[in-house]
């Protein structure tokens, strides 16, 4: 089970991060935004859009596999680690600025997931056999 988590959650985070980052790049390349078919065509012509869709498909399939065995509370929380990974990838790859408030928020997310994981592991240990 631990192997599933050790492989599954980083894979989910990687697919989600890929999808979010690629949609951002596709959107930037399709500027200026206009609510018309021409803009939709510009978005559809971006290879980044298609990579993002593949990322979402990979995330969906990974998530469905994880949900078969992982407890829903910690799994749902851990699935939101992509918020942190997208923040870091955006700073590194897209040269976006990270504010102190964003860093604080990322820290709160990681700490919250850590606390849920500790709580879940204690419940598993304390559960009657």
Image (cartoon, grey):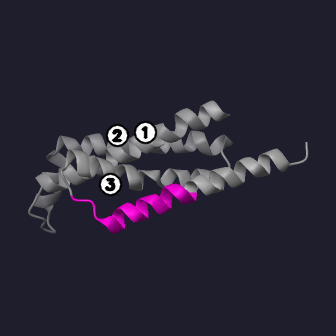
Q: Residue at x 13, y 65 (%)?
A: 33
Disc number for residue 93: none
Q: Nearer the viewer, mark 2 or mark 3?
A: 3
| Foreground tag (1 vs 3) | 3
Q: Quadrant of the C terminus?
A: top right
The image shows residue 112 at horizontal and vertical percentages of 56, 60
User: Would you say the residues marked 2 and 3 are in contact, meaning their CB atoms lie under 8 Å apart?
Assistant: no
Considering every residue shown, the one lying at the far right of the view is: 129
Q: Give the mark nearer the N terminus: 1 vs 3.
A: 1
Q: Residues within 10 Å of mark 1 (few under 14, many from 20)?
A: some
Alpha-carbon span between mark 1 and mark 3? 20 Å
**In the rendered image, which quarter is residue 58 located in?**
top left
Residue at image x 64%, y 50%? 117
Dot 1 falls on a residue whose secondary structure is: helix
Picture coordinates of residue 25, whole percent (x, y) = 19, 50
In the image, 4 versus 116, the foreground residue is 116
Q: Which mark is residue 58?
A: 1
Q: Which residues are magenta?
A: 97-112
């Amino acid at each position: 089970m631990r192997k599933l988590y050790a492989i599954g959650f980083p894979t989910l985070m990687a697919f989600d991060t890929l999808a979010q980052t690629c949609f951002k790049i596709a959107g930037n390349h399709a500027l200026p935004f206009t609510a018309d078919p021409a803009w939709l065509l510009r978005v559809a012509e971006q290879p980044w859009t298609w990579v993002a869709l593949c990322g979402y498909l990979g995330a969906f399939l990974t998530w469905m596999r994880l949900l078969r065995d992982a407890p829903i509370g910690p799994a749902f929380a851990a699935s939101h680690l992509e918020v942190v990974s997208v923040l870091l990838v955006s700073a590194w790859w897209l040269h976006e600025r990270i504010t102190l408030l964003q860093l604080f928020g990322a820290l709160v997310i990681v700490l919250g997931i850590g606390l849920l994981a500790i709580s879940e592991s204690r419940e598993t240990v304390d559960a009657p056999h």
